[in-house]
Image (cartoon, rainbow, N blue to C red):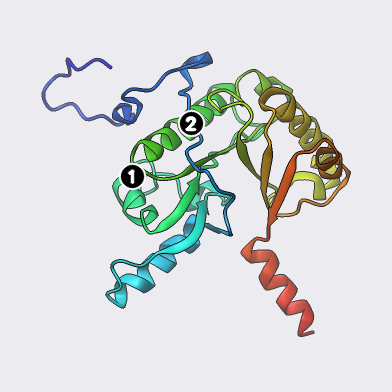
Amino acid sequence: MNQNIRPGCKDIWNAFMADGASFGKYDVPFCPTTATQIPVYQVTWEEARQIHKKHIVKKEYDYHENAFVNWYLDDYKFDGPRGIWNGYKFVLKVLRHFAGAITPDFSTNQDFPEAIKIYATYRMRLYGYWLGRNGIPIINNVRWGTPETFSYCFEGIPVNSIVAIGTVGGGPRKLVDRERFETGLYKMVEALRPHSILVYGSANGECFENLRAQGIRVVSYQSKTATVFEGRKRHE
């Protein structure tokens, strides 16, 4: 890192997060998996903030939640001027009360410019690397798009580790997305050879059965939206 910075300059790129990191293709940082256990359950960042606020209001400053925090949300709910990129100190403050975190899920939508998709991948790994260096147990989120993303979207993730994916916003449940999702899922397994895949959302479908048949552990976590929807159906 270049320390010869002019007085008054501000690090809007969060370059300090990369201190001590190693880099791969496109300078995507390597993000070690520092979690050693499969999460008991997951909550989104939005839910984690609500939990944190409730405890602080009650002056419960030493609380602990046995959940991993994820960012399987629309980007506007955690990114932007007042999001986690600029509010990293608050993020760390909250996460210290939780069991660990899945690295942020910055979008790589297929209609995005390639430069933005590469930058999203860079930020996922950088943020996760920094959280891990600050003592937060980390599991890498894997996000892919259309086939051109395969050349970089798996960069910076350890081989033969635990990885996490989200199927809440699309994935195999929607026919229009299924082929793209399954192609990327199999490509991810080929590239990273994970021993465990954590799925936030539905893990039903032939593609997941195929992975289980290969000896890969697939663990699914029901989203809050699905839980609420099921509750409504039971009361209809």
Q: Residue at x 68, y 69 (%)?
A: 227
Mark 2–mark 1 Cα distance, whole angstroms, equals 19 Å
Is residue 60 or residue 79 the one in the foreground? 60
- The residue sitting at 33% across, 29% down in the picture is 13
Residue at point 31%, 25% (across, down):
19
Which x, y percent locates residue 77?
Answer: 49, 53
Return the residue nearer the eye: 149 or 102: 102
Q: Residues within 10 Å of mark 2 (few under 14, many from 20)?
A: many
Q: For residue 231, which quarter of the picture?
A: bottom right
Mark 1: few/some/many CA within 10 Å (<14, 14-19, 20+): some
Q: Where's residue 133, x and y in %?
A: 35, 36
Q: Is residue 229 above or below residue 116?
A: below
Image side of residue 56 versus residue 143, left or right = left
Q: Position of residue 58 (x, y in %)?
A: 31, 78
Q: How many marks?
A: 2
- For numbered disc 1, what is the local secondary structure? helix
Q: Amino acid at mark 1?
A: Tyr
Q: Nearer the viewer, mark 2 or mark 1?
A: 2
Q: Outermost residue toward the left?
A: 7
Evaluate if marks 2 and 1 touch, with contact meaning CB atoms under 8 Å apart: no
**Among the two numbered marks 2 and 1 on one chain, the one whose residue lies closer to the N terminus:** 2
Task: Name the residue at the right extreme.
Answer: 206
Read off the residue under disc 2: 32
Residue 88, numbered circle = 1
Q: Amino acid at mark 2?
A: Pro
For the N terminus, the image quarter is top left
Q: Quadrant of residue 141?
A: top right
Q: Position of residue 83 (x, y in %)?
A: 39, 48
The reply, left or right, for residue 65 in relation to residue 13 is right
The numbered dot on residue 63 is none
